[in-house]
Image: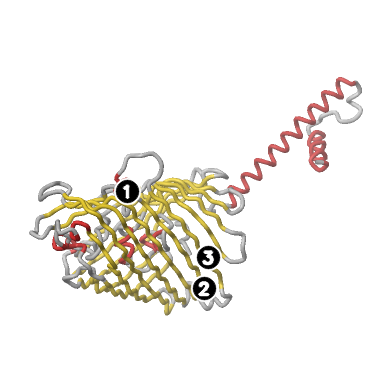
Amino acid sequence: MHGKGTMTLAVAAALGLPLTAGAQTQDELKALREQVKQLDKRVQDAETTAQQAAVQASSRPASESVMNPAVSLILNGIYSNLSQDPNTYKINGFVPSNGDVAPPPRGLSLGESELAIAANVDHIFRGTGIFSVSPENQIEVEEAYIQTLALSYGFTIKAGRFFSAVGYQNQIHAHAWDFTDAPLVMKAFLGNQLSDDGIQLKWVAPTPFYFDLGAEAGRGKSFPAGPDGGRNKNGVSSGNFFTHFGGDFGTGTAWQLGASYLTTSPQGRVYDDVDSTGTLVTNSFTGTTRLWVLDGILKWAPNYNPTETYFKLQGEYFRRKENGDLTFDTAGAVGTQTGSYSSAQSGGYLQGVYQFVPMWRAGYRYDRLDAGTTSIGLVGSGALTAADFPVLAKYNPTRQTVMVDWSPSEFSRVRLQYAQDKARSDATDNQVFLQYIVSLGAHGAHKF
């Protein structure tokens, strides 16, 4: 306070205020003290404003400001050569998610483009909007959320629409994936990628190694909950709890392990199938879905420089249990019937990517799903037969993928990928993709 008072007196002197003999009466002295008091308050307000501006500036990338947000555009194009018709793609043994799980169309096509806008709103909030443009010229809000910047004790709150922190790769945008498409487990259990409207609370511990805990509450607008959870209600329809921990071995090797638990209660989640006579029917599931995920990633860069040689190993294991009622032929074309349904299914993938020289990488991924055990009450009671639910017939899909890509800079990549996809029980799909990805404008750092 003494320092601030000295500063105030110096400023008062500079302004020509009478600080000495000029203040000879009690009234003049009282007026002078009031002026100094007001001036001291102005100095404190100015210091507070400067501190807030410094906090805001320190957390904002140098290339952006409130009036000039960071804007980026991702362009993605692909050539596909497929031995099977992508319009008939399905993952046998698993309830269809109705998500965007099929390969891209045959031939040349424009992939999903992405426009991102982000900036710090003030010293409290940061806003991010990411919009995707499909090849069919449909615009979709991929992510649109606010995030806190100044909470204490390592807490962060995110609210809006965002990719759920279930597993590892679900949080990463497709253009930053190491392969052209998502692993089979994400297609079967998350409908390719889970985005929801909700709120996330995350805490990062003040430890020498990385450790976080988090929870999400969501609307349940998409699979596995179904469209808006199939309900019209207040509150939330899905929840996710997650944790990650990791560190650095000190030899250019970094690692991270994670676990998450997603629970939701779909109401009337529909999917299409055919019955034993080949008639198209629409079935629906109402009940509970619980999904456990374990994930891990290991990165090795001997020279601590990822632009040179490095290796990355990544894997995830999913296990899902569903219990409830399965309604056959909701439209009544053949005859609506409802019975119990339960399943316990799992799957996972393991992939490795090696950058053997600067700008060139090669990778391999192995996917496997386990249909586990499925109990259909309508079949057990004899009301219907297993042939009336062909897509749920027990089958364990697999896929093997290899790729090589070239990245002349951090803003562009060209990838050649081949996959032997056995998601269908009756056919193997040999897939060849030639893809380009370019980034225009400022783009934020990707997840570890």
Disc with the residue nearer the chain's start (3 vs 1): 1
* Residue 323, x across and y down, in percent: 31, 56
* Residue 35, x across and y down, in percent: 78, 28
Give amino acid for label 2: Asn
Residue toward you, 56 or 331: 331
Of tags 2 and 1, which is closer to the observer?
1
Q: Is residue 44 above or below residue 158?
A: above
Q: Are marks 3 and 1 in contact (CB under 8 Å)?
A: no
Residue toward you, 40 or 234: 234
Res. 8 visible in picture? yes
Q: Residue at x 86, y 20 (%)?
A: 27
Is residue 269 shown left or right of residue 198?
left
* Residue 297, x across and y down, in percent: 46, 70
The alpha-carbon separation of the residues under discs 3 and 2 comes to 22 Å
For label 2, count other residues whose C-alpha is less than 10 Å away and answer few (under 14), some (14-19) or many (20+): few
Of tags 3 and 2, which is closer to the observer?
3
Res. 436 visible in picture? no
Q: Is residue 58 above or below residue 366?
A: above
Give amino acid for label 1: Glu
Secondary structure of the residue carrying tag 1 is strand
Report the disc number at residue 305: 2
The alpha-carbon separation of the residues under discs 3 and 1 comes to 33 Å
* Quadrant housing the N terminus: top right
Report the disc number at residue 245: 3
Secondary structure of the residue carrying tag 2 is loop
Report the disc number at residue 140: 1
Q: Residue at x 55, y 49 (%)?
A: 149
